[in-house]
Every structure is written in C-alpha cells, then in structure tokens.
Amino acid sequence: MNCIVCMTHVPDTASIIKIGPDGKHIDESGIKWIVSPYDEYALEAALQLVEAQGGEVTVVCYGPARAEAGLRECLARGAHKAVHVVGGEETLGDSMAIAKVLAAAVKDREYDVVLCGVKGVGTDNSQVPQMLAELLDLPHVTNVTKLDVAEGTFTAEREVEGGVEVVESPLPAVVAATKGLNEPRYASLKGIMAAKRKPVEKVEVSALGLDEAALAGAEATYSVRALELPPAKEAGKVIQGEDDPKAAAAELARLLRDEAKVI
Amino acid sequence: MDFALDDQQRMVQEMVRSFAEDRLRPGAAERDRTGEFPHEIFEEMGELGLLGMFVPEEYGGAGMDLLSYLLAVEELARVDASVAVGMSVTNSVCCYPILTFGTEEQKRRYLPELASGRAIGGFMLTEPHAGSDAASLKTRYRDAGDHWVLDGSKAWITNAGVGRYFVCLATREPELGVRGISAFILDADQDGVIVDRPEAKMGLKSSRTAMVTLDGARVPKDAMLGEEGRGFRVALGTLDHSRLGIAAQAVGIAQAALEEALRYASERQQFGRPLIGHQAIAFRLAEMDTEIAAARALLWHAAWAAGQPGRHSRESARAKLYASEMANRVVGQALQVHGGYGYSREYTIERLYRDVRVTTIYEGTSEVQKLVISRALAELAGTLA
Ligand SMILES: Cc1cc2nc3c(=O)[nH]c(=O)nc-3n(C[C@H](O)[C@H](O)[C@H](O)COP(=O)(O)OP(=O)(O)OC[C@H]3O[C@@H](n4cnc5c(N)ncnc54)[C@H](O)[C@@H]3O)c2cc1C
C-alpha cells in the first residue's frame, strides 16, 4: 500500500490577515505557515494505512521555498519521502494549474491511493482533488470521514447534506479527507530527529513538462481582481433586563424575529 | 550570532505548543483544584519523547539539544506549570545525571525506561535540615556486602509517589563533609522507601511533592552514580544544568501571564475605553514584554554557554536568578491589571500567581544563585589581581 499525500502550506488559521500593497495578495510578513489542517487528516489516514498494510507515504507539495518546512513537518510525523515542486507564487488559488502540476508530479510514481485535504485553508476552493483525479483518470471521493481499504478497493463514508453516503470504489483513487476522519498525531521527538535524515526531492515545474509562466498567464483559469477584508463585525446588542425582565424578553423575541429573522 | 531557531527546534516548539494547548489546557484549572497527578499526560509525553529529551537514540531517547528541551519546558509551563516541573525533573535531574555520570551499564539499565515514560524520575538532595546548605545532608549509606543500604529523610521530593527512579545523595559519614557524599540511583519501588503524604502546597498543585523516609533502602552495588565520595560534584553538575529548566519554566509562566493580561486589558472597559487604552496599563504590558524577552535571551545564551567547554555555573545561575525574579514581578503586574478579578479563582492569573512563586526557591533559591555568581566573580577578581 503506497500512499501519496498532497499537502499545501497555508497561513496559520490564527493569523491576522492583512492585504498586501498590490491589493491582490495577502501581506505575508509576520505570517506563520502551517500544514493545511485538512491535509493533516489526509496524512494521518495515509500513515495509518501504511502502518497496517506496509508500504510508504510520499508527501507532495507544490509551493514556494518556505513550504519545505511543511514537508519536514510531515516527515517528522512519519511520512517516508517528500517531493517539493518549487513555485506556485503566481498560480496561487488557481486550482486547475495546481492540479496540473500535482498530476504531473504524481503520475509516474507508484501509488495505490492519493490522499488530499478536502480544501486548502485560506483559499478554500475545494477543487484540486477532483481536478487531480480527472487529470489522472482516477475515481475520486471527497469529504471523507471514514475510510476502509481492502485489496484493490475501498469503502468510504462521505458527509453529504443531511446524511452520510457510503461509497465503494476500486483503487487507485483520489480521496479527499475532512474533519472527523481521524485525529492527527503529533510529531514525536524521534520523528523530528528522523525527519532530518529523510529526503526532500526538489522538482522544477519545467522538469514536469509544464510551463509555469503559461499556467499563470495564457492558460490561467483564475485571476484575482482585488482582495477585500470582510466588513468589521458590528458590536453586539445588549438588552438591559434587570428592571423589567418581561419587557426585555419581549424585546429580544421581537429583535430575533424582525431584525435577525431567525425565528 | 544567529538568534533563529533551527528546523528541529522550531518543530519541537510547535509540537509542544499544540500538545500543551490540546492536552494540558482543558484540564489545567481542574487539576489545580483537585491536585490530581495526570498519569495519562505523562504517558503521552513519554511516547512523544518529552521525558528523555537528551537521551541518545541508542538508549531509547530522541537525542535532542539543550535549547530544544528549554523550548519544550517553556511551552508546557505556559499552559500548566505543574506538568512542566514533573517533566523537567525527569529530564534534567534524573536522566541528565545518569547520562553524564553513569556507566554504560547504568545507562542501558535505566535510561530506556525513563525516556519512554515507563518510569518517571526524580532527585533526592534536600533534607529537613539541609536545604540551601545541601552539603550538610545526613542521610547515610553503608556497605552491606552485595548492596548498599540507605537510611535518612529526604524533604520536598518532586515526583515522590509517582516516580520510580531517583538520583539520591547520601553520606558515608557526615563528619567527612562533601567528601563523604556519594550519589546513587535509587529504585523507589521497595519497602525501604516510604513516601509521606503529599505536601499541601501553595501552587503547582498537580505536581506531587512529598517527604520520603529511607528506612534500610537497598541500592544494588552497581547503582552508585559516579565515584564514591564524588557525589556532591554529581549534584552540583546536575543543578548547573537543571536550573536552566526552572528558568524556562519561569519564562513560560511569565509569557502566559502577559497573554492573560493582554487579553483582559483589551476586553475590560473602564472610563469609557479598554484598559489597554490607558497608558499606565499599556506601558505596564510593554515592560512585561521587555522583561520576558530579556530573560529568554539570557536563558538562550546560558544554553549556548552550556554547550561550550568549561564550566557554566555563572551563566546558569544568572539565567535562573533573573528569569525567576522577573516572572514573579511580571505575574504580579499581570494580576494587578486584572484588578479584583485577578484575585478570583475564576481567572487563570490567580493560578499563575501561586505557581510562579516557587521558581525563586527550588533548585537553588535566588540567594543561592547570587552566591554562585558572586563566587565566580570573586574567583575572577582573584585571577585578575
Ligand atoms: C515545590 C518544591 C519542590 C521541590 N523539589 C525538590 C526535589 O525534587 N528534590 C530536592 O532535593 N529538593 C526539592 N525541593 C527543595 C528545594 O530545593 C529547597 O527548598 C531549596 O533548596 C531551599 O532550601 P530550604 O527550603 O531548606 O530553605 P533554606 O535553605 O532554609 O533557606 C531559607 C532562606 O534563607 C536563605 N539562605 C539560606 N542560606 C543562605 C545564605 N548562605 N546566604 C543567604 N541566604 C541564605 C534562602 O535563600 C532562603 O531565602 C523542592 C522545594 C519545593 C518548594
């Protein structure tokens, strides 16, 4: 059982996001980068599969130089190998471009399953796993909260509106993990030491037969016109109720019905 | 000079931070109330390698550097100082001396158990009548043919009752002074080791501390640590090292206090604006931030010095002295920012205030640190004169 995990390196979910001077990118100064939390579920699933059935976990990331820290983190948690396709600054958010690069980086490797996070935190597009599966001509299942792999096939449970769908599919396949699939482990100290000795293979986009300038230019499927921060949250409303709780309750009900329109 | 952490150190820091947030934070206030020792947390720390951080891989550890260890202690102490002290004691006053002064057989015998968390460790130096003046200890050992026998009382022993292996200091004959003192690796799992009721402490509630009576405690012949009569050097060498862990603990508690004060000062409104909008409060926070950074820099410098040849007692003592005094000041200031609410058990700062107090006391009081530093200065003056 060989697993490939596609990892994206994203701003820490606790970061305070500011918009950069060009109005189209975020200001990266002072941002801490982390392995996208959904990818942690994918990695954990891969590690568990390999622990149970043997084989290797290879983590693949298409991202700038700093993303190597994310790959090291995955190696520290137990992945065997890492592949770093260096680049991606100009194709950020373009799911199709990212899927093309990942497909090219993955296609000639040995694998039984490709695991992704259901989305990258921050851009939140939820498109790369499906596109990657199409480009690799593989079946895919997304939003997976339970995964059982047997010889050549797997069963997955996926969250759908109002219920759970159980899907069976042959392998190889692309599986996109979401919260609930497992509880990602911490990197142990031995794992952190071992990560130093594990290889990170550096790959140029051009070596994959792709032209990054074209992906970001003529072939781009996505462009950012402008970024805006969400409007500041308005201050909450406090209904004073100490003197007349009855009136306060009536006022609360009125506001919930007429203004918030939730009842 | 490079102040950046390397990849390994950064990963350790991040891992321990998430571990502390996920695993320690939820029960910290509750453990402070019940005083219950968190066995599962220690098991998990053992599995992660946090209880034998310096222990090389060949003895079952991760073989980490001193700074990685200090970062881990700081992150644990930032969330639960009781857990941090149990962890630092196992690492730095039990694993460290066995690693530094032990024979090959001793390392193979004890370190794998300690490093994996299957056994928690500790240190028995202090006695009811021997605190700062540790060399006046009276616990005796005698040669009983195929083993040693220890008799006496040890006071304030962290991890007593939950730990298994203790580096224990005893004398062949008190008249001999420091030359009579030897160090032993004591297995507490025997009838001759009697653990008293846990001390009713002001803080660090879930860390176990108790008086221990040694009544004919047996130690195998090959479990003397270092040469006979050289035990006090084992103790001093260990403390030079372990003090840095207490300094890291102090920095972690102070950091937590700053975070609590900053949050509170941003939310609490008085005179029509948040507290932080009053310059007296804002400046107080600025001073706290600066003092914490100064202590951390001193600590990291001491960690660097510990990796250089020669002694580093002065650097360690400075870091411990400054960090622990700083942390007491900062936590006091942070409580002041909370006003009356800081005096309530409802707020974390109240626990921090009690937990931080001991940092200027254990592993050498502030006065003892000043003795160490001033002796080094006097020695320096002597060589210069
Ligand atoms: C929570 C806790 C955990 C502990 N864990 C351990 C442990 O695991 N193992 C262990 O061996 N010990 C442990 N100790 C003991 C600790 O190290 C001692 O309390 C400490 O060394 C001080 O000794 P003492 O309490 O006897 O104070 P004393 O030595 O009696 O000191 C009293 C006061 O006099 C001052 N003083 C003493 N001598 C001088 C001097 N020459 N010049 C100036 N001032 C002086 C001291 O600084 C202090 O302010 C622990 C203590 C506590 C509170």
Image (tube, helix red, strand yellow):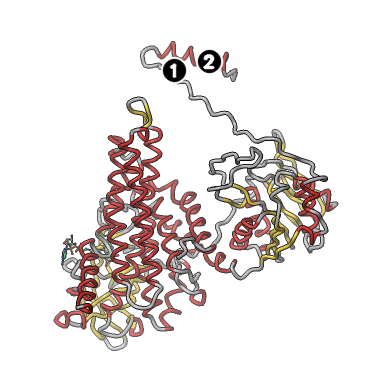
User: In the rendering, which numbered label is found on residue A239?
Assistant: 1
Q: Position of residue A257 (x, y in %)?
A: 57, 15
Which residue is label 2 attached to? A255
Q: Position of residue B267 (x, y in %)?
A: 40, 33
Quadrant housing residue A226: top right
**Where's the N terminus of chain A, which quadrant?**
bottom right
Secondary structure type for disc 2? helix
Residue in view at x 57 percent, y 28 percent: A231
Residue, x 67% and y 46% (percent of image)?
A: A120
* Residue nearer the viewer, A184 or B316: B316
* Discs 2, 1 touching: Cβ within 8 Å: yes
Q: Label 2 CB, ligand 1: below 8 Å? A: no
Q: Nearer the viewer, residue A119 or B33?
A: A119
Q: Earlier in the sequence, mark 2 or mark 1?
A: 1
Classed neighbour count for the residue bearing mark 1: other residues with Cα under 10 Å, few (<14), some (14–19), many (≥20): few
- Residue positioned most to the left: B175
